[in-house]
Image (cartoon, rainbow, N blue to C red):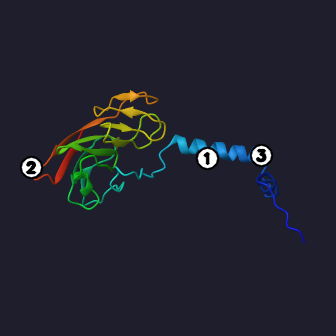
């Protein structure tokens, strides 16, 4: 008895998948991946966990149009924000430690297609990993395809340096 090997096309044909069906399936998957944020936060070296936090760490409203909350930097989910260059997300907001106990908070979703942006310490800017839009710390677009900037929020570090107050 001799074994015969199938190439990929033959295998898929045996499964009943035509090349047109495969192309349609591939294209739909690609469109879905580009068109919206799938809820998975980037897990790079600059992202301390990508955690959304717990109700104990975030007090107030960190989502929607009325952003106004306090973030506990002693909570395990957000303690890495005390490190220069670190960033994390709280609801709809990205918070970055830009150094010397200074913080920036902006809307986290790229206006182009809603992907969560990331802070880049070496460039002191924000970048969308999906299509490469870049934003200044002022929220302004510095590289397209995004056609509008990110919303900037007011950030106040407490005297004991353990909480951040973030508001519109």
The picture places residue 75, in percent across and down from the top left corner, at 23, 60
Residue at the spot of label 1 = 29
Between 28 and 125, the one nearer to me in the picture: 125
Q: Is there CB contact under 8 Å for labels 2 and 3?
A: no
One can see residue 108 in this view: no
Q: Quadrant of the N terminus?
A: bottom right
Q: Is there CB contact under 8 Å for labels 1 and 3?
A: no
Instruction: Please tell me the numbered disc located at residue 126.
Output: none
Cα separation between marks 2 and 1: 49 Å
Asked whether, in this view, residue 35 is left or right of residue 133, the answer is: right
Name the residue located 26 percent from the left edge and 55 percent from the top edge.
80
Say whether disc 1 or disc 3 marks the residue closer to the N-terminus: 3
The picture places residue 72, in percent across and down from the top left corner, at 21, 56
Residue at the spot of label 3 = 19
Q: Quadrant of the C terminus?
A: top left
The picture places residue 69, in percent across and down from the top left corner, at 23, 48
Asked whether, in this view, residue 1 is left or right of residue 20, the answer is: right
Cα separation between marks 2 and 3: 63 Å
Say whether disc 2 or disc 3 marks the residue closer to the N-terminus: 3
Residue at the spot of label 2 = 159
Name the residue located 17 percent from the left edge and 52 percent from the top edge.
163
């Amino acid at each position: 008895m001799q074994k015969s090997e199938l190439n990929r096309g033959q295998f898929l044909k045996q499964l009943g998948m035509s090349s047109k069906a495969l192309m349609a399936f591939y294209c739909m998957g690609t469109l879905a991946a580009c068109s919206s944020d799938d809820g998975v936060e980037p897990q790079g070296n600059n992202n301390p966990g990508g955690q959304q936090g717990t109700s104990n760490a975030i007090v107030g409203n960190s989502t929607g149009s009325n952003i106004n909350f306090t973030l506990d930097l002693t909570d395990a989910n957000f303690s890495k924000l005390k490190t220069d260059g670190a960033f994390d997300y709280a609801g709809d907001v990205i918070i970055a430690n830009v150094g010397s106990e200074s913080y920036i908070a902006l809307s986290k979703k790229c206006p182009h297609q809603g992907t969560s942006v990331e802070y880049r310490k070496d460039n002191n800017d924000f970048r969308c990993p999906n299509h490469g839009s870049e934003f200044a710390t002022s929220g302004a677009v510095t590289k397209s395809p995004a056609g509008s900037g990110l919303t900037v929020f007011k950030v106040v570090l407490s005297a004991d340096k353990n909480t951040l107050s973030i508001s519109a």
